[in-house]
Image (tube, rainbow, N blue to C red):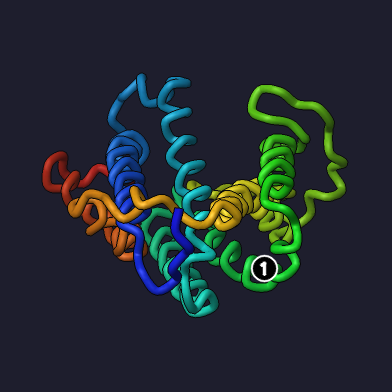
Amino acid sequence: MRGLNNEKRYALLDSLRGLLLLEMIVYHFFWDLVYLFEQDLPWFHSSLCYWWQQSICWRFIFLSGFCWPLGKRAVRRAVQVFGGSVLVMLITHIFVPDQAVTFGVLFFLGSGMLLLKLLDRLLCRVAPVWGITASGMFFFLTRNINDGYLGFEEWNFFKIPEQLYLNKFTTYVGFTEAGFFSSDYFSLMPWFFLYLAGYYCLRFCETLGGLPQIFDYGSGFLSFFGRRSLSVYLLHQPLLYLLLTLILGSKVLL
């Protein structure tokens, strides 16, 4: 193990981020086929595809939390990510209102960055093992909060009072108001707990002396995408739409 170096990039982390971005692009290629170009792909609605999509989200959010302590200028990065989220929101509301994005993953990631900036000194006082345990437990318990329950996936343990599900602010927190729709929705709960689990895993590595040398090695191809994650995220959907339009013709419902 070596001490953490906030002045360098770790190639393995960039490669993992790049791999997840490529997985996301492939998934969104099929999503566009189904929801924008009305292609019939029954397998896309299968439980296996659902868990693939979920695994991309879970791994990306966990990795983002893991990388947060290694970054610099957290506020600046958060503002850039928020700016990207506003751009996505405006474009989707104007051009594809039936699949518009509100409180999408970029908005969540910007929120997570700012929250950790505010809470870092307090959270550092918690032993990493306890932080990982508590974060994982709260993620498990609040996974179904958007649907009105404490629970995880098909297991609902407790119905949350409907009075908490009021408006856009409660929707942002996780208590989703009636009638709300977003094709990409990541509220603070449960996802901030998964983000925290990644944060505490990095803190745990600190207690062991840092990251092993293997983190210096990665794929140059994947790292190229990983180092440009925000740009790739913002550009991939317009490029996919252009590609599919050239192949299939314009069949999207505006």
Q: Quadrant of residue 39?
A: top left
Q: Residues within 10 Å of mark 1 (few under 14, many from 20)?
A: few
Would you name the residue on which mark 1 appears?
120
| Amino acid type of the residue that numbered disc 1 sits on in the rendered structure | Asp
Where residue 165 sits in the image (x, y, percent)?
A: 78, 49
Looking at the image, residue 242 sits to the left or right of residue 177; the answer is left
Residue at 83 percent of width and 50 percent of height: 164
Q: Please give the count of numbered marks on the rendered protein.
A: 1
From the viewer's side, name the closer residue of 127 and 35. Answer: 127
Residue at 77 percent of width and 35 percent of height: 150
Looking at the image, residue 245 sits to the left or right of residue 20; the answer is left
* Res 51 visible: yes
Is 174 located above or below residue 53 in the figure? below
Is 241 located above or below residue 156 in the figure? below
Where residue 140 sits in the image (x, y, percent)?
A: 69, 35
Residue at 31 percent of width and 55 percent of height: 216
Q: Residue furthest left?
A: 246
Where residue 222 sits in the image (x, y, percent)?
A: 24, 50
* Res 101 visible: no
Where residue 209 sits in the image (x, y, percent)?
A: 53, 56
Looking at the image, residue 254 sits to the left or right of residue 204; the answer is left
Is 79 located above or below residue 201 in the figure? below
From the viewer's side, name the closer residue of 75 and 170. Answer: 75
Q: Quadrant of residue 44?
A: top left
Q: Secondary structure at mark 1?
A: helix
Q: Quadrant of residue 25?
A: top left
Looking at the image, residue 226 sits to the left or right of residue 89; the answer is left
Residue at 37 percent of width and 53 percent of height: 13
